[in-house]
Image: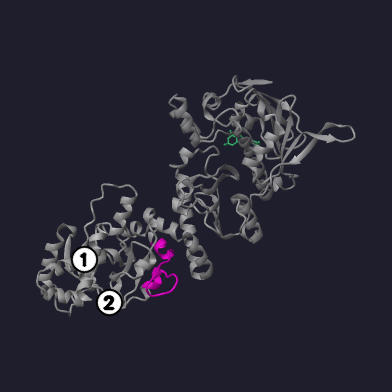
Amino acid sequence: MSKREFQTEVNQLLQLIIHSLYSHPEIFLRELISNSSDALDKLRHLTLVDEAYKSLPFDPRIDLELDEEKKTLTIADTGIGMSEEDLISHLGTIARSGTKNFLTQLSGDARKDSNLIGQFGVGFYSAFMVADRVEVVSRKALEDKAWRWVSDGKSGFDIEPAERAVVGTTVLLHFNDEGAPYANSWRLQEIVKKYSNHIAFPIFLTYDKSEWKEDEKKSVKTRTTEQVNVASALWRRPKNELTDEDYKELYKSISGDWEDPLFWFHTKAEGSLEYTTLFYVPSKAPLDLYQAEYKGGVKLYVKRVFIMDDAKELLPQYLRFIRGIIDSEDLPLNVSREILQQNRVLTSIRTASVKKILSELKNIAANQPEQYLKFISEYNRPLKEGLYGDFANRETLLELIRFKSTKVEGLTSLADVKSRMNEGQKSIYYITGGAESLLRTSPLLEIYKKKNLEVLILDDDIDEIVFSGVEKYGDIDLKAVNKAGTGDDLKDEAEPDKAATLKPLLDKLKAILGDRVKDVRASVRLADSPSCIVSDDEEPSMQMQQMLRAMGQKDIPAPKPTLEINPDHEIVKKLLARPDDAVATDAAWLLLDQALLMEGVPLKDPATFVQRLNRILNLSI
Ligand code: ADP
């Protein structure tokens, strides 16, 4: 037997793992199973590509054997195995430069250090969290000799010749106090299902199963071997081997949804980064979609090993309705949530995944319009949220979002709106701020109707916030009809300037309404109504101001609308000709109040409004 020291870095790492790293020691099993799975992957690969290995028997499996009395567990695989040198170099030094660099950066502050370590794999050494003695017996493929490596995780390791009937590796753990709870078959099954259910190889557990024997009237223990995992990482199989039923079953098992998904997108990326993604769109929006405490629906795997779910970093917030799996080859197994946020590998996967999801949706929109409408009826709004946060994909999102409009029944796309634009039309127009019925009857739309211009009806409560930040669709301006500046588009060059004729009336109205209005102007956008209100281009609309105040923003200044009046309307013409008197004053206030009412803004002083209305009624009856 030869005694060897651990490399200094290994000692450092062991100290760190044991004293500060894991709040869940149970992950030792995930790490060891993952090593076995890697070893099986390696041997399988060689048996496929290398002549020397082709004739080797290959019965891939991972066997866990529990001895509850002795408090030991073995994890045995039929993988590639390790030679004497392998054992010395792999389980006695730290070869990977990343981990070495990391160790040199250690500050000595256990809490900070344990955060840092999430970036690197610690793998095998995590066994010393739960065991005070670890034995590894391994026989490498194509070799006859086997070797035993033994360590207490403190004073280095011993190595000696050993016997092993077949190629592979067995890790024997002697549980310490920390590990004692894992000398329990229930616990082990639970952990395997949680972390390693989709490891591609079968994992068997051999343990003493208690069964009640009716004839003996007592419970009897029988040594039993059972497969614990489902052993199929479906998403790793090529698409053409998978049926729709396979996809649907997996969806139901990971999402807990009873219904079939609407669509799924399965991608395998190879190149500088290797990963597989399988994303599902549920047929009904998740119930917590609009709750601040929503649960993310994408699970992160590393090399088929489950790492975490509900990781909100995996996709942008607006895609929180997506369910599915990201399985990366390049992340370390013990990557933590904190690290995910700034991890370069994950950032690339995320960017590519968003692009993929959006482009698949575009395909569906183009080729399966009916299915796409089902999608839109559930998810139009989250896509709009994306306009607000995901600038890189704004154009694509604009193409995916659907709109109500004055020209068509149902919903329409911006591409279709563009194709219907009038000759010489420079902008696409929309109206926001209130319920659909209110918007559709707004006086602001009159001129658009007259000029046969299409207007989008944006009646979602987030529309104004979202669309006020979106200035263009391609090279076409997007303009809100309730903004003062938008009127300039509609001026008829040929028409005489009516503002000049109207000037005396405008001045009179300004004097009467005083500081209740910002300005009074001649309107170019009205046809049937005498007046309307508009907001300054950079100001939130009246409705938005109302909403902000309702949400508790008390410091919003009192709204000051600009009143526009229709130079061609009978009332306005009569008012222009009328001397200054009480009737003119009442009429001025009524022009403002009715415009506010039409925009859904409640009146400050309904009593006075009604008195004025009655005085005028009295005169006309
Ligand atoms: P990692 O798995 O992240 O490389 P580990 O410390 O877990 O780090 O393992 C170090 C190395 O030991 C592995 O890269 C592998 O070469 C070898 N090894 C560990 N477990 C096994 C096993 N069951 N079979 C074959 N080789 C193994």
Magenta stretch: includes residue 400: yes
Marks counted in the figure total 2
Q: Which residue is mark 2?
A: 424
Q: Position of residue 558 (x, y in %)?
A: 23, 53
Disc 1 marks a residue whose amino acid type is: Arg
Is residue 186 visible in the rendered structure shown here?
yes
160 above or below 303? above
View quadrant of ligand 1: top right
Q: Which residue is mark 1?
A: 612
Q: Position of residue 118 (x, y in %)?
A: 50, 35
Mark 2 C-beta closer than 8 Å to ligand 1: no
The boundaries of the magenta stretch are: 395-417
Disc 2 marks a residue whose amino acid type is: Gly
* Residue at 69 percent of width and 38 percent of height: 189
Magenta stretch: includes residue 511: no
Q: Most extreme residue toward the bottom, as rendered?
A: 494
Mark 1 C-beta closer than 8 Å to ligand 1: no
Q: Position of residue 428 (x, y in %)?
A: 32, 69
* Residue at 30 percent of width and 47 percent of height: 553
